[in-house]
Image (tube, rainbow, N blue to C red):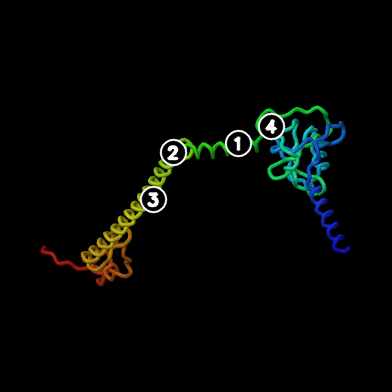
Amino acid sequence: MSFRRVAVAAVLAFASISSATKEKAAQDPISGTDTVHGCYKSYGQMKSQGEVPFNTQGKCTELCRNLTKVAAASNSHLCYCGDEYPAKADLVDDDQCTEPCPGFDTDACGGLDTYTVYNTGLRVTVGESQEASPSSSSTSSADATKTSSASEAPANTSDTIETVTASSEPDSGSGGPNVAGIAAGVVVGVVCVSGLIGGIFFWLRRKRNAEIEEEHRRNAAVNAFISGGGKPPSSSGGLSMSDSRLDPVMNRRMSDGSIADNQDYSRRILRVTNA
């Protein structure tokens, strides 16, 4: 009995798991209620709304309904909204949409590169996209590239080399160096360095001239001292002004030599003359 119960429980668990990951069958659109439209391998021209925490059919369709979008699609946590269903050529079997919705695991939210598409209930009649969807077009272009590269390897190799060579050429208009700016900077730098060198040269020259003049002045003073009997020239252009009190000769009267100061001229002098 216990073995039978275990077997029945295992069968029921397997059935619940398989039913939890099964896509709902497509329904006719009902105004005011979201319904499943089918399982598609692309989301057509719908725009991604990012990740929705605990995404479910109801959360994704409510988000798109608030954006006044009539169609929605989900893939696990991702939600897409748009004004039309994906292309009819992208419709696949329901068993390819087996990814459980994060917020309600009994419903399927897309699968591996597949999307569960809904009608949000705003409008019953919804058109289908006539253009290739981003996902399907990229897949088809990748397959076409692989096929062409496998069948025409030498031709594609040469084309690739030519393309890389063309794209490796620098763009002289935008990516090249600014020649005018570099030239202007060099000229300004040369002028500044030349001015600095010239200033230093004139300063040294002026300093040297000052030293030469000072040396010449010293030599002139020495020569004047030697030729003037030991009296150095004063600072008044070589003219010396001596103090008379320091010169004993100046203490004598200016009449020295004409009238003797030690003679008494108050008494009359008798003169002898021949009669």
Query: Toward the viewer: 104 or 238?
Result: 104
**Picture quadrant of residue 263:** bottom left
Q: Is residue 171 visible?
A: no
Q: Which mark is residue 196?
A: 3
Relative image position of residue 160 (x, y in whole percent):
46, 39
Name the residue beneath numbered marker 2: 154
Q: Label 1 vs label 4: CA separation?
A: 13 Å
Q: Is residue 185 visible?
A: yes
* Sequence order check, earlier mark of 2 and 1: 1
Q: Label 3 vs label 2: CA separation?
A: 65 Å
Name the residue beneath numbered marker 1: 140
Q: Residues within 10 Å of mark 2 (few under 14, many from 20)?
A: few
Q: Image quadrant for the C terminus?
A: bottom left
Q: Label 3 vs label 4: CA separation?
A: 80 Å
Q: Label 2 vs label 1: CA separation?
A: 22 Å
Contact between labelled residues 3 and 1, with CB atoms less than 8 Å apart = no
Residue drawn where x is 31% and y is 54% of the image: 205
Dot 4 falls on a residue whose secondary structure is: helix
**Picture quadrant of residue 61:** top right
Amino acid type, callout 1 = Ser
Name the residue beneath numbered marker 4: 89
Relative image position of residue 48 (x, y in whole percent):
72, 39
* Sequence order check, earlier mark of 3 and 2: 2
Dot 1 falls on a residue whose secondary structure is: helix
Q: Residues within 10 Å of mark 4 (few under 14, many from 20)?
A: few
Q: Residues within 10 Å of mark 3 (few under 14, many from 20)?
A: few
Query: Toward the viewer: 108 or 50?
Result: 108
Dot 3 falls on a residue whose secondary structure is: helix
In the displayed structure, does residue 168 sit left or right of residue 16?
left
